């Protein structure tokens, strides 16, 4: 069953769901996670204390609002728009990532996020 997560990125608060995959379960077990986030185009990424290999969900073309894990960088990724590698109409990550979930609200709100802003991932939703 998918797990509901709370995402605070700078001044933006969103909800998401984690999929029922081995990598997503590892992330769920480590929550809460606090970090400072980095921007790469319209992707936020940050290191997390999880180690996992590429899995059957791995791909380098993602959808707006998808949450992913980048094994090479041991990083959590939030995609809210084009990256420097994107072509018209698609979002391309720097490398293959495991898809671990999705934002349930409007991911374009993350355009307010600035490089280095605080990030919090925790269990639950906005009403908790």
Image (cartoon, helix red, strand yellow):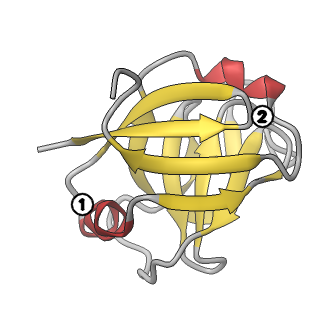
Callout 2 crowding tier (Cα within 10 Å): few <14, some 14–19, many ≥20:
many
Whether 90 is drawn above or below 116: the answer is above
What residue is rendered at 67% in x and 61% in y?
35
Quadrant of the frame with the C terminus? top left
Whether 93 is drawn above or below 66: the answer is below
Residue 101 percent location from the top left of the image = 38, 44
- What residue is disc 1 on? 21
One can see residue 57 in this view: yes
Q: As rendered, which of 9 and 87 lies closer to the eye? A: 9
Is disc 2 in contact with disc 1, using a CB cutoff of under 8 Å?
A: no
Q: As rendered, which of 89 and 33 lies closer to the eye? A: 33
Question: What is the secondary structure assignment of the residue under circle 2?
Answer: loop
What residue is rendered at 50% in x and 54% in y?
68
Residue 81 percent location from the top left of the image = 72, 30
Real-space Cα distance between discs 2 and 1? 25 Å
Residue 5 shows which numbered tag?
Answer: none
What residue is rendered at 50% in x and 46% in y?
67
Quarter of the image for residue 43 reads top right
One can see residue 94 in this view: no
Left or right placement of residue 117 versus residue 11 in this view:
right
Left or right placement of residue 53 versus residue 119 in this view:
left
* Number of on-image labels: 2
Residue 75 percent location from the top left of the image = 61, 68
Left or right placement of residue 87 versus residue 45 in this view:
right
Instruction: Tell us which disc is closer to us: 2 or 1.
Output: 1
Quarter of the image for residue 10 reads top right
Dot 2 or dot 1, earlier in sequence: 1
- What residue is disc 2 on? 82
Question: What is the secondary structure assignment of the residue under circle 1?
Answer: loop
Left or right placement of residue 95 versus residue 106 in this view:
right
Callout 1 crowding tier (Cα within 10 Å): few <14, some 14–19, many ≥20:
some
């Amino acid at each position: 069953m998918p797990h509901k997560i709370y995402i605070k990125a700078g001044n933006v608060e969103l909800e998401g769901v984690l999929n029922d995959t081995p990598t997503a379960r590892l992330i769920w077990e480590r929550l809460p996670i606090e970090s400072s986030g980095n921007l790469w185009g319209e992707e936020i990424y940050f290191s997390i204390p999880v180690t996992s290999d590429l899995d059957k969900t791995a791909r380098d073309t993602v959808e707006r609002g998808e949450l992913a894990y980048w094994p090479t960088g041991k990083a959590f990724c939030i995609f809210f728009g084009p990256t420097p590698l994107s072509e018209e109409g698609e979002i391309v990550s720097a490398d293959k990532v495991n898809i671990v979930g999705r934002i349930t609200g409007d991911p374009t709100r993350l355009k307010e996020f600035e490089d280095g802003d605080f990030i919090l991932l925790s269990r639950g939703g906005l009403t908790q």
